[in-house]
C-alpha cells in the first residue's frame, strides 16, 4: 500500500498485545498504520466501549487468551479483518465474523515444524525421564540413592496421531524416522497417507502406546481424549498434548496419572491456562511446559512478517495470505 501523506489519517489497527515487537517491523508498521494497544488490566469490551477510536478500527490483531465474541465485535463496527498469531481459531467466533463479512487470518502452518519438534521432545523426555533425572541429580540424590529408574526407548513404539494436519504430518515424519509405527485419526481419511486410519479415537488409542494430540479444538473435539480413550491406552500409555488443553478431559487425565492408570504425559497446553492442576506438579512421569511449543526466535520473526503482509494486503485490496476458509 502507498504511505499516506501527513494530512491523511493512518488506518487504525487494534492489538491485544505489544505488536510489533521487532524493531525493524515496528518502524515499518508505524509509518503505515496507527496502532492502538488494548489495556489488559481491564476487560476488553470495557476498554473498547470507553475508547473513542474503537469505532474506526479496521483490523484486530489477537491471540488465544482473549475471546473475540459477539460482544467484542459489537464494539468494533468498522472491523474488517481479525488476525490471530495462533494456528487455532477456537477463540474467535467464526460464525459471527462470517455473518458480518469480517475476514479471519491465522498463522496457518507457520508453526508446524516447531510444534512437531516440541511434541517429539516432550515424548522423548517422558519416555527417557530426562527432566525427572535432571531433578534427581540436582537434588544430590545420585550418590545417596544410586541410579535413577530406567526409561523406555522410542523406537518401535506405536504412535497414534490425533489430527493429521500440517503439525500432525510433521510429527509423523519425525517419529517415523525413530522407527515408530504410526496410525492416525483425522476428520477424514487421507487417501495419499500410507499410515493406518482409525475413524474412532478409542480404536486408535487401543492400538497405540502413545497418543499425540494436535488436532483443532471445536465442539466436536472438546474432550475428545476422554476417560474411555485413556483406558484403552492402558497403564503404559502416554498422552502428548500440543494442541489445546480442552482436547483432553483434564480432570480424568489427572486422575489417571495419579492412580497410574496411564504411564505418563507431556503437556504444553492446559484447560485453564496459566493454571496447571497442582497434582501434576508432584508427578515425575509428567513433563510440563507453558504453551510455547510453536514459539522460537525464527517463528516469532516469521509471524511478524506474516501479519505485516496480511495487513498490507487488506488495506491494498489484495488477497490475504493466510485466510481461514470454509467458515
Image (cartoon, helix red, strand yellow):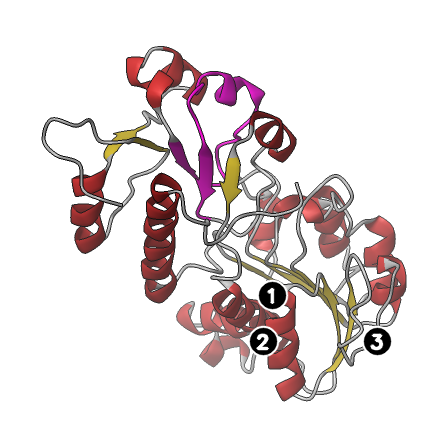
In-image side of 158 versus 243 (left or right)? right
In the displayed structure, 184 sits above or below 24; it is below
| Span of residues in magenta | 59-85
For disc 2, the neighbor class at 10 Å (few under 14, some 14 to 19, many from 20) is some
Residue hosting label 2: 124
> Is 81 within the magenta?
yes
For disc 1, the neighbor class at 10 Å (few under 14, some 14 to 19, many from 20) is some
> Is 20 within the magenta?
no
Residue hosting label 1: 166
Query: Quick one: 42 or 54, which is closer to the camera?
Result: 54
Q: Disc 2 or 3, which lies upstream in sequence?
A: 2
Residue 283, x across and y down, in percent = 61, 57
In-image side of 2 versus 233 (left or right)? left
Query: Quick one: 58 or 152, which is closer to the camera?
Result: 58
Q: CA distance from mark 2 to mark 3?
A: 23 Å
**Residue found at x 16% / y 28%:** 8
Residue 252, x across and y down, in percent = 76, 46
Amino acid at each position: 500500500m502507498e504511505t499516506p501523506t501527513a494530512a491523511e489519517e493512518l488506518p487504525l489497527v487494534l492489538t491485544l498485545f505489544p505488536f510489533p515487537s521487532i524493531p525493524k517491523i515496528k518502524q515499518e508498521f508505524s509509518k503505515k498504520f496507527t496502532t492502538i494497544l488494548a489495556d489488559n488490566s481491564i476487560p476488553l469490551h470495557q476498554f473498547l466501549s470507553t475508547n473513542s477510536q474503537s469505532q474506526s478500527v479496521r483490523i484486530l490483531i489477537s491471540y488465544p487468551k482473549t475471546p473475540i465474541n459477539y460482544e467484542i465485535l459489537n464494539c468494533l463496527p468498522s472491523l474488517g479483518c481479525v488476525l490471530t498469531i495462533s494456528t487455532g481459531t477456537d477463540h474467535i467466533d467464526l460464525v459471527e465474523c462470517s455473518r458480518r463479512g469480517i475476514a479471519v487470518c491465522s498463522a496457518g502452518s507457520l508453526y508446524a515444524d516447531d510444534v512437531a519438534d516440541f511434541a517429539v521432545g516432550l515424548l522423548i523426555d517422558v519416555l527417557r525421564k530426562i527432566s525427572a533425572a535432571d531433578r534427581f541429580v540436582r537434588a544430590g540424590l545420585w550418590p545417596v540413592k544410586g541410579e535413577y529408574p530406567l526409561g523406555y526407548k522410542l523406537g518401535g513404539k506405536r504412535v497414534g496421531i490425533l489430527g493429521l494436519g500440517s503439525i500432525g504430518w510433521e510429527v509423523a515424519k519425525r517419529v517415523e524416522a525413530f522407527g515408530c509405527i504410526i496410525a492416525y485419526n483425522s476428520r477424514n481419511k487421507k487417501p495419499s497417507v500410507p499410515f493406518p486410519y482409525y475413524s474412532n479415537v478409542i480404536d486408535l488409542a487401543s492400538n497405540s502406546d502413545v497418543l499425540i494430540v494436535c488436532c483443532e479444538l471445536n465442539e466436536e473435539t472438546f474432550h475428545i481424549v476422554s476417560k474411555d480413550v485413556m483406558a484403552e491406552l492402558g497403564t503404559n500409555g502416554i498422552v502428548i498434548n500440543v494442541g489445546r488443553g480442552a482436547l483432553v478431559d483434564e480432570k480424568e487425565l489427572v486422575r489417571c496419572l495419579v492412580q497410574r492408570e496411564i504411564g505418563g504425559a507431556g503437556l504444553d497446553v492446559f484447560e485453564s491456562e496459566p493454571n496447571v492442576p497442582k497434582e501434576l506438579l508432584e508427578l515425575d512421569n509428567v513433563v510440563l511446559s507453558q504453551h510455547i511449543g510453536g514459539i522460537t526466535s525464527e517463528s516469532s520473526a516469521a509471524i511478524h512478517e506474516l501479519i505485516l503482509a496480511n495487513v498490507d494486503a487488506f488495506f491494498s485490496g489484495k488477497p490475504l495470505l493466510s485466510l481461514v476458509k470454509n467458515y
